[in-house]
């Protein structure tokens, strides 16, 4: 079987994002297990805030097709996302809301057909004591309801994330590193089984 391909997304792409750093730790763990990991910057999709009038006039922006195609090429997805006031970030929700508006085009599936059944490993990071856990649980719900992805049961919320990384970007705490590895291992197990089943 060819190497598993994972799509890595962050709910924050600001310079110095803690979630982006945590995503990189997860990506490194996946690569060390033989997976190919491709990061897609959601900000680079340049998706405007979803607006039905805009959609009526201009259709679904090209950025949504880039996300669809990246998901289509992937056997699974890694996501690290912060919480804003207890909720997933607009960058994340807006991207998937636009994706959900894409109809099938030629041999390309509708946006939601591409997400359905796709395995997912979930992470969050915050400088606070809960590590974004409240929104992590909402993100799980959001992506597994109509977006129809398949999150693995394991997840990891990194608290006090401002102090968690060393200068090389690695997690200082071996227990936290093990928690990341557990999510990645579960994701690769499920993605591998689904790929083998065809
Ligand atoms: C609008 C806003 C709301 C926030 N709300 C929360 C929150 O509810 N819980 C939390 O732990 N951190 C909250 N934070 C702090 C973020 O966790 C922190 O800015 C974090 O570094 C953002 O993730 P990033 O570093 O990946 O960009 C909030 C930050 C912003 C800008």
Image (tube, rainbow, N blue to C red):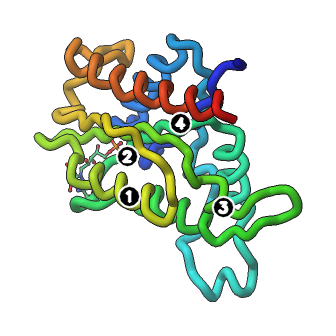
Residue 87 in picture, x, y percent from top left: 29, 61
**Mark 1 Cα shell of 10 Å, populated few (<14), some (14-19), many (≥20):** some
**Mark 2 Cα shell of 10 Å, populated few (<14), some (14-19), many (≥20):** many
Residue 33 disc label: none
Q: Earlier in the sequence, mark 2 or mark 4?
A: 4
Residue 154 appears left or right of 128? right
Task: Give the SS element for disc 3.
Answer: helix
Cα distance in 3D space between marks 3 and 2: 21 Å
Task: Give the SS element for disc 1.
Answer: loop
| Residue under numbered circle 4 | 8
**Image quadrant in which the N terminus is located:** top right
Q: Earlier in the sequence, mark 3 or mark 1?
A: 1
Q: Nearer the viewer, residue 122 or 10?
A: 122
Name above or below for residue 161 compared with residue 89: above
Question: CB of mark 2 within 8 Å of CB of mark 1?
Answer: yes
Question: CB of mark 3 within 8 Å of CB of mark 4?
Answer: no
Task: Say which of marks 3 and 2 sits in front.
Answer: 3
Q: Nearer the viewer, residue 61 or 78?
A: 78
Cα distance in 3D space between marks 2 and 1: 7 Å
| Residue under numbered circle 2 | 81
| Residue under numbered circle 3 | 111
Residue 130 appears left or right of 108? left
Q: Earlier in the sequence, mark 4 or mark 1?
A: 4
Q: Earlier in the sequence, mark 3 or mark 2?
A: 2
């Amino acid at each position: 079987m060819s190497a598993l391909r994972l799509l890595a997304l962050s709910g924050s792409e600001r310079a110095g994002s803690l979630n982006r750093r945590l995503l990189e730790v997860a990506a490194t763990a996946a690569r060390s297990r033989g997976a190919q990991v491709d990061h897609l910057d959601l900000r680079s999709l340049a998706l405007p805030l979803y607006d039905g009038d805009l959609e009526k006039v201009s259709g679904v922006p090209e950025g949504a097709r880039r996300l669809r195609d990246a998901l289509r090429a992937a056997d699974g997805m890694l996501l690290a996302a912060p919480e804003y006031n207890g909720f997933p970030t607009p960058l994340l929700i807006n991207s998937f809301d636009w994706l959900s508006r894409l109809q099938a085009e030629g041999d390309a599936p509708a946006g939601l057909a591409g997400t359905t059944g796709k395995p997912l490993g979930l992470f969050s990071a915050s400088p606070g004591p809960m590590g974004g856990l409240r929104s992590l649980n909402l993100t799980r719900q959001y992506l597994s309801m109509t977006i129809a992805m398949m999150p693995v049961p394991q997840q990891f919320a990194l608290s006090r994330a401002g102090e968690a990384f060393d200068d090389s970007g690695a997690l200082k705490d071996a227990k936290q590193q093990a928690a990341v590895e557990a999510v990645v291992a579960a994701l690769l197990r499920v993605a591998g089984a689904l790929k083998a089943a065809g």
